[in-house]
Image: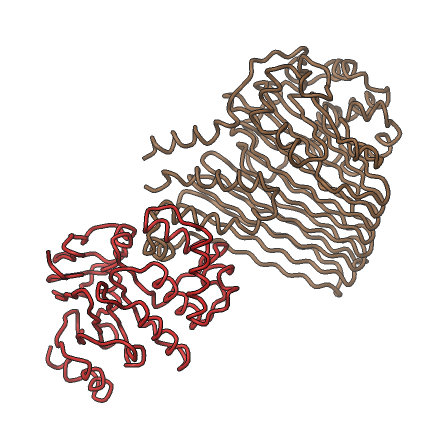
Amino acid sequence: MSEQKKHVADIDRSMYDFKDKDTSKFKAHKGLTPEIIRKISAEKHDPAWMLDFRLKSLELYNKMPLPNWGPSLEDLDMDDITTYVQPDTKMKGNWKEVPDDIKNTFERLGIPKAERDSLAGVGAQYDSEVVYHNVKDEVTKQGVVYTDMESALTEHEDLIHEYFMKLVPPTDHKFIALHGAVWSGGSFVYVPEGVHVSIPLQSYFRLNAPGAGQFEHTLIIVEKNASLHFIEGCSAPKYNVTNLHAGCVELFVKEGAHLRYSTIENWSKNMMNLNTKRALIEKDASIEWVSGSFGSHVSMLYPMSILNGEGAHSEFTGITFAGKGQNLDTGTRVVHAAPHTYSTVNTKSISKDGGACIYRSGVEVRPNAYGSRSSVSCESLMLDAKSRSDTVPVMDIRNDDVDVGHEARIGRISEDSIFYLMARGLSEEDARALIVRGFAEPVAKELPLEYAVEMNNLIKLEMEGSIS
Amino acid sequence: MSENLIEIKNLHVTVEDKEILKGLNLSIQKGEVHVLMGPNGAGKSTLVNTIMGHPKYNVTSGKICLEGKDITHAKTDERARRGLFLSFQSPEEIPGVSVENFLRTSYGAITQKPVKIFAFKKELENTMAELQMNKSYAERALNVGFSGGEKKKNEILQMLMLQPKLAILDETDSGLDVDAVKIVSKGVEKYKNDENGLLIITHSTRILEFVDVSQVHILVNGRIVHTGDRSLIDEVNTSGFAKYETAV
């Protein structure tokens, strides 16, 4: 049976596991020194203040300890991680001009097709640099800026200077300090006041080089009464060495604006995914996070919403699926920092084959946030006795006039449910898969269609041969 | 070729090492309706769950044949594909899976043929209307938040859609109000024909209003101790099982 499982797991990842030959143009030496930072900075033609920022971040990184909580990071040896890998191409605005091997990678991941079918703009990052960026004319005409961070640093330096790592400062934790020092690539989006971008923008991050890190920075500013749906996808082929992803996402949602931020992360199972995401939500503005975590060896991911203005609203919907050898520590944080702010958290996790899902959340209601409401619900499903699931919900409530609810459920698939479905002709495998799909359904329906289909296929494949 | 739909011979069943069925014999022919009665703990649910192949029930000897084929150790899904159906006493709730989606999956699994989606939907709607079920139930998650009566109607809906050869109703009428029993009884009448069979566990005649009962069995302490006609039901309801229990 375990033979078959292996076979299935191989098929399962085949869509992501193809690797291209490493043809990178410039690679930083492994490990980290000020010299390497200077070299990366020079290669990227940073302004002086950015080089300065990088060097200060590096100092912080060297001083700060590893987190003393959460999953073990002992497999991570920074001296073995290459922090900067420049693909041998300049960024293009037309897929035809992207080198064939890189273009084929994105073709196989379905990105150009999705762009033609359902997206207003696409950015594609390969290792450390964005290799493709394109936006539909009508979106550009609305005054929307959607470009890679490097171009933004040249063309919109004032904006970047004003916002870059102000919401997530490098002092926050060790890996965000690292990010501040070596960040490269990522997307910049600016939606002007009152503009509604009716179809989504999507950035796709692909890490090809073995033993490398990806440190993309995504900065999105949605001005007053504007709206946007942004989709982020990530994947990498499997190598025997550890890869590191320590990206940063900063989202500024201004008064009355709305942002929907969807992520499907399917990193290979040698990836340490230590990603930091944060949103600042102003008066009457709202954010919807939709987050699917399926890949990586270890993940620590807790997107945070700061409800900074009266009437601000956040909604977090997440699903985590941990299989063999995976320890996925995910969740969310919400800070109610203004009166009458509202948050909803709804997460599901599935663990199987010895995988571990840890749900961690923090809801903080500040003294001034009277009249606020928060509702947290987390549900876990363990598919066998080897797997693990924990929930660590923390609530810090500093005033009396709030309405806070929390609900947690951890369960297994009951024999009786399987029997019921089998009594209606379903095989045991199909019965289990149907129950798991049903469990995931409330999240699946929030995902962009192609990702929902992908998630269902993933569950089906993961469930095949899972009967012992 | 025998006309036997199901034949159970000398069936011994244990649950967690305790013997519940102790040599049970029962056969049902095509076109017949059998009623099974017995005191609590006699083994009624053990029998129906064993017929359906619940892994908790362990057959230590004897056998079960469906249309002449030995299914004593067949998997539950194979039994369903061969035409067995159990209307559960407490149907399971399956979140996130709609009634329609579930029934379509089940129908496809049992017939082993692709399901014509629109024709199926039409038939589902018609059948639901006959059972006076609101159309919106097709979109709702299977049994989640359903009342007891709605769950039982949903079982009968499945029976009508799947058209099994032998349907076993495990106390489908218990907990239903008068109107609901009437609707369910109509459903049973609609299902019944000369080619299929029914095994009904019940305490009353209410669900049998529109069907002819072939035989009534009294199950006590793991064995069928008496078999009679329809009048036996009223007798039991008046006098109870005491006389059969002391006979054992």
In the depicted structure, whether residue A155 falls above or below residue B134: above
Q: Which quadrant holds the C terminus of chain A?
A: top left
Q: Is residue A63 visible?
A: no
Provide residue A237's location: percent of width, then percent of height: 53, 24
- Counting the numbered discs, the total is 0
Q: Colour of chain A?
A: brown
Provide residue A135's location: percent of width, then percent of height: 75, 30
User: Residue, x 58% and y 38% (percent of image)?
Assistant: A450
Residue B67 as seen in the image, left or right of residue A289: left
In the depicted structure, whether residue A354 falls above or below residue B239: above
User: Residue, x 70% and y 63% (percent of image)?
Assistant: A403
Q: Which quadrant holds the N terminus of chain A?
A: top left
Residue A393 as seen in the image, left or right of residue A169: left
Provide residue A424's location: percent of width, then percent of height: 34, 55
Which chain is red in the rendering? B
Q: Dividing the picture into quarters, in which one does residue A185 lie?
A: top right
Residue A131 as seen in the image, left or right of residue B30: right
Q: Dividing the picture into quarters, in which one does residue A353 lie?
A: top left
